[in-house]
Image (cartoon, grey):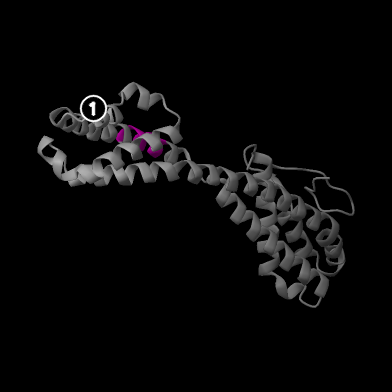
């Protein structure tokens, strides 16, 4: 949320809390009670959307970068064992299939890197017992299998997070507009009788429904004789 949206959200929460604390003052007014329930629901939706919007996938992206580095290192390691075995056994086809350069791996598209890592894994798996003498371990091969599968999943995971954040942003803006309209078009007019019947209650509502610019440290003033101060038109 930007500063203006945060200020508006704070006001909606302030009104919700004020009405909740003073529900006995208007509990006989069914329409106002319903409007308060609606406002509370809007605030819940705003909170949920803001939590999703705030998800930072920077950490996941960095972890993915680290995983890519590890995947390349493991692929090169297993490739080296395969090439050594191929040379010793005179298996030219295996040598050609297992040969890959680190530069190529680093510059491959992510999907191609996964395909190549899996290809090296698939070459090594049935030859495990034969390449152990060259220093290969089961842990190396298992980790390569885990890494290429995990790396493959990272891209859609990050993409989905970004998609969820984008949708949450749209929902957030919609709910803020909905909350603002609810205050201006329903709750404000229904609070007008309390200006005469219960001035103290009404004055508290005016304070609660004033939008305060937290950064600037002052309330937004836009008062008229028939409307509370601080309303944004």
Q: Which residues are magenta?
A: 62-70
Tell whether position 187 is magenta. no
SS category of the residue bearing label 1: helix
* Residue drawn at x 50%, y 44% as measured from the top left: 156
The reply to whether residue 56 is in sight is no
* Residue drawn at x 80%, y 48% as measured from the top left: 231
Q: Which residue is mark 1?
A: 92
Q: Quadrant of the C terminus?
A: top right
Please identify the quarter of the rendering in which residue 154 is found. top left
Query: For this rendering, which residue is in front, 103 or 7?
Result: 103
State the residue lying farthest toward the top: 103
**Number of labelled discs?**
1
**How far across and how far down the image is residue 204, in percent?**
73, 60
In the image, residue 95 above or below residue 38: above
Q: Quadrant of the N terminus?
A: top right
Instruction: Examine the residues drawn in magenta and state their main secondary structure.
Output: helix
């Amino acid at each position: 949320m930007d500063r203006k949206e945060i200020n508006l959200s704070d006001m909606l929460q302030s009104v919700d809390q004020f009405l909740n604390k003073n529900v006995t003052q208007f509990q006989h007014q069914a329409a106002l009670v319903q409007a308060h329930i609606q406002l509370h629901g809007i605030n819940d939706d705003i909170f949920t959307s803001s939590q999703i919007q705030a998800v930072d996938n920077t950490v996941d992206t960095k972890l993915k970068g680290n995983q890519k580095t590890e995947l390349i290192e493991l692929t090169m390691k297993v490739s080296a064992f395969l090439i050594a075995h191929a040379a010793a056994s005179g298996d030219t086809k295996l040598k050609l299939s297992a040969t890959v350069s680190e530069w190529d791996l680093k510059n491959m598209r992510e999907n191609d890197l996964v395909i190549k890592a899996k290809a090296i894994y698939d070459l090594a798996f049935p030859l495990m017992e034969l390449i152990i003498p060259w220093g290969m371990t089961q842990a190396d091969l298992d980790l390569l299998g885990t890494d290429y599968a995990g790396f493959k999943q990272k891209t859609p995971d990050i993409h989905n997070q970004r998609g969820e954040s984008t949708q949450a942003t749209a929902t957030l803006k919609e709910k803020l507009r909905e909350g603002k309209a609810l205050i201006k078009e329903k709750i404000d007019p229904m609070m007008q009788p309390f200006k005469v019947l219960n001035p103290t209650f009404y004055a508290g509502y005016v304070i609660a429904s004033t939008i305060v610019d937290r950064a600037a440290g002052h309330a937004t003033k836009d008062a008229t004789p028939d409307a509370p101060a601080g309303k944004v038109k």
